[in-house]
């Protein structure tokens, strides 16, 4: 049996590869959009619906809701955006981030090495377009390498009695899954990585789908930490934006937590593979929460202003 130290070391390496891949891919995609990202956010967010669309599109391109929220908090702190405008963006960012979870469920194992090689050589290009495309391709390849690594480590890790007991506890008590997802995401600043780790346990039948959904719900709360940290030292409206992001996701989790069994049954009918089912549940959760909140942006903004006066 592989030693626990070896498993933890390899796990840390694969996590670093996943986060590195996300960063490299985001850099390439951001280069492709040149420096217009902030301009898009500033000029097309005068209405919550527009803000939600812009937030969803930019997050899907950058593959990081945390990055979009940090940019948004920065624009609010600089006075380019109002707190009210930022709410539409955060609704959209929650939707856009689900693209990553859907992406990592694809089976492209035969193409990972070509992706890495092509992307790697493109990184040496001095021209902007090849470099940007190479960064995106190389980063994507890193994501799939990390996912394969997570999946390979899940089974050896589960052979330890303490891990077995904890997984059993998570399967029986979904609230623990929510707490676990929140803590892990807050520590590594990536809800996609947290969901990816859950997928590896699901594919090895070590984690139940409802428990995986609970961890996914918690990851949506944990991802708010990055934006909250970005608001430190900012003006009042920047802090309100961070608080709104936290409360929006907490309310969403409170609504969906009792519905975990129902959501689990629904996504099981949509797909055969457990990782795809979890990815679909993330899409459904974020879509439903964002569209429910959209008509109540004004009252919600007033609630946050009164609560954090």
Image (spheres, rainbow, N blue to C red):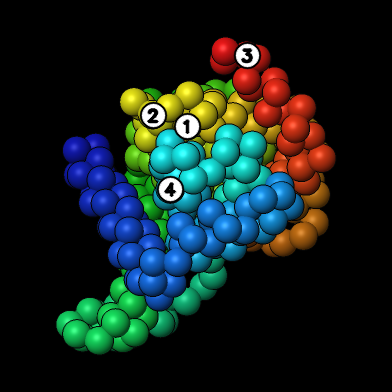
Question: Marks 2 and 1, how far apart in space?
Answer: 6 Å
Residue 168 visible in this rendered orientation of the protein: no
Density class for disc 2 (Cα within 10 Å; few <14, some 14-19, many ≥20) is: some
Nearest the camera: 123 or 238?
Answer: 238
Label 2 element class = loop
For the point 38% across and 29% down, the residue is 234
Q: Which residue is mark 2?
A: 234
Which mark is first along the chain, 3 or 4?
A: 4
Residue 224 visible in this rendered orientation of the protein: yes
Question: Marks 1 and 3, how far apart in space?
Answer: 15 Å
Which of the labelled discs sits on residue 71, or is there none? Answer: 4
For the point 69% across and 56% down, the residue is 50
Res. 4 image quadrant? top left
Label 1 element class = helix
Could you tell me which quadrant the C terminus lies in? top right
- The reply, left or right, for residue 209 in relation to residue 69 is right
Which mark is first along the chain, 3 or 1?
A: 1
Res. 212 image quadrant? top right
Question: Marks 4 and 1, how far apart in space?
Answer: 11 Å
Which of the labelled discs sits on residue 238, or is there none? Answer: 1
Nearest the camera: 279 or 69?
Answer: 69
């Amino acid at each position: 049996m592989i030693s626990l130290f070896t498993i933890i070391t390899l796990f840390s390496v694969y996590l670093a590869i996943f986060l590195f891949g996300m960063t490299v891919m985001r850099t390439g995609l951001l280069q492709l959009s040149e420096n217009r990202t902030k301009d898009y956010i500033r000029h097309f967010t005068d209405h919550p619906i527009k803000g939600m669309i812009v937030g969803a599109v930019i997050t899907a391109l950058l593959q990081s809701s945390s990055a979009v929220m940090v940019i948004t908090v920065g624009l609010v702190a600089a006075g380019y955006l109002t707190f009210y405008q930022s709410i539409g963006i955060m609704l959209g960012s929650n939707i856009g981030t689900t693209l990553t979870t859907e992406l990592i469920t694809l089976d492209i194992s035969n193409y990972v090495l070509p992706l890495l090689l092509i992307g790697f050589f493109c990184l040496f290009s001095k021209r902007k377009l090849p470099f940007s495309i190479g960064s995106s391709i190389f980063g994507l390849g890193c994501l799939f390498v990390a996912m394969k690594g997570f999946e390979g480590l899940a089974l050896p890790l589960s052979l330890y009695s303490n891990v077995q007991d904890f997984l059993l506890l998570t399967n029986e008590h979904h609230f623990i899954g929510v707490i676990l997802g929140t803590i892990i995401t807050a520590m590594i600043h990536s809800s996609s990585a947290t969901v990816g780790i859950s997928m590896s346990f699901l594919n090895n039948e070590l984690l139940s789908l409802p428990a995986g959904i609970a961890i996914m719900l918690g990851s949506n709360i944990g991802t708010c930490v990055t934006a909250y940290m970005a608001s430190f030292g900012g003006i009042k409206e920047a802090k309100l934006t961070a608080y709104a992001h936290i409360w929006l996701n907490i309310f969403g989790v409170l609504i969906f937590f009792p519905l975990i069994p129902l959501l689990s049954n629904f996504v099981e009918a949509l797909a055969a593979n457990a990782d795809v089912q979890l990815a679909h549940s993330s899409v459904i959760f974020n879509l439903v929460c964002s569209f429910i909140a959209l008509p109540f942006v004004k009252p919600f903004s007033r609630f946050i202003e009164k609560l954090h006066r």
